[in-house]
């Protein structure tokens, strides 16, 4: 049974949509879903993996980025065991690209399959991380959103709507900045510094900890930690 504390109910979502957009039939939704999809389960077992999927209902193009060097060969081994063809891989970048000749999105009971049967446009790529898949949708009719959410509930999938706004008609402009593009130039130490700072509440208002306090807790030199953090922040801002 899907936990009501962990996601919106269909009735709550639809009531909100109908209240905010009484005459609007075209709107944008960003949906987060936790299901039993193979790639979603893979991201649960390997938390450092980020997965991007493009699908045309016949073939999938999948890009997998693994931040943890120890997890990278394990991820490759598991994907090969599925029978998928890895067309390119890079050990230095810990990323691999594969083409699935038989689209797993349409052959399995996935959210993409349900979206494809409704009057909803799925803007690819779909992004998977930490046991969740993220989907950006352009919805043409409220009834189709209702039906999609009912199907998710029927299968017992957890979901949460992260964004509901009127669609402004521009897709490309919002696709220029992706998580992959934003963090691709960061080194592993810089990513670790960002995540460590975030975990200790460095970016809360007011801050829960300063650089000195975080460095002491992590038992690392303050100057080293601060250097990695500032370089990471500068790269993200430039991105």
Image (spheres, grey):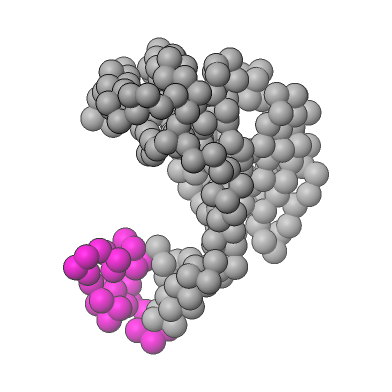
Tell whether position 71 is magenta: no
The N terminus, quarter of image = top left
Q: Residue at x 75, y 52 (%)?
A: 89
Residue drawn at point x = 49 percent, y = 68 percent: 236
Residue 52 appears anywhere in the view: yes
Q: What is the x, y in percent for residue 76?
A: 68, 45
- Image location of residue 198, percent across then percent down: 34, 63
| Relative height, residue 174 to residue 199 (above, below) | above
The answer to whether residue 206 is left or right of residue 150 is: left
State left or right for residue 234 relative to residue 208: right
Q: Quadrant of residue 185?
A: bottom right
Q: Residue 186, relative to residue 43: is it above or below?
A: below
Residue depicted at x 23% and y 30%: 5
Q: Which residues are magenta?
A: 196-224
In this orientation, does residue 109 appear? no
Examine the structure image and report whether residue 209 is included in the region drawn in magenta.
Answer: yes
């Amino acid at each position: 049974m899907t936990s009501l504390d962990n996601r919106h109910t269909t009735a709550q979502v639809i009531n909100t949509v109908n209240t905010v957009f009484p005459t609007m039939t075209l709107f944008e939704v960003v949906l987060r879903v936790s299901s039993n999809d193979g790639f979603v389960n893979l991201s649960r077992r390997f938390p450092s993996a980020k997965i991007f999927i493009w699908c045309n209902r016949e073939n999938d193009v999948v890009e997998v980025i693994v931040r943890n060097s120890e997890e990278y060969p394990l991820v490759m081994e598991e994907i090969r065991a599925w029978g998928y063809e890895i067309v390119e891989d890079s050990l230095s970048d810990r990323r691999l690209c594969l083409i699935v000749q038989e689209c797993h999105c349409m052959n399995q009971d996935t959210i993409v399959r349900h979206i494809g049967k409704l009057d909803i446009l799925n803007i690819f790529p779909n992004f998977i991380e930490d046991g969740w898949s993220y989907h950006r949708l352009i919805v043409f009719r409220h009834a189709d959103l209702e039906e999609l959410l009912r199907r998710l509930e029927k299968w017992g999938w957890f979901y949460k709507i992260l964004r509901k706004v009127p669609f402004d008609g521009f897709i490309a402009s919002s696709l220029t900045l992706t998580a992959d593009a934003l963090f691709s130039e960061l080194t592993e130490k810089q990513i670790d510094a960002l995540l460590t700072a975030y975990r200790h509440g460095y970016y809360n208002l007011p801050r829960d900890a300063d650089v000195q306090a975080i460095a002491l807790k992590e038992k690392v030199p303050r100057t080293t930690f601060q250097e990695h953090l500032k370089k990471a922040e500068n790269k993200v801002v430039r991105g």
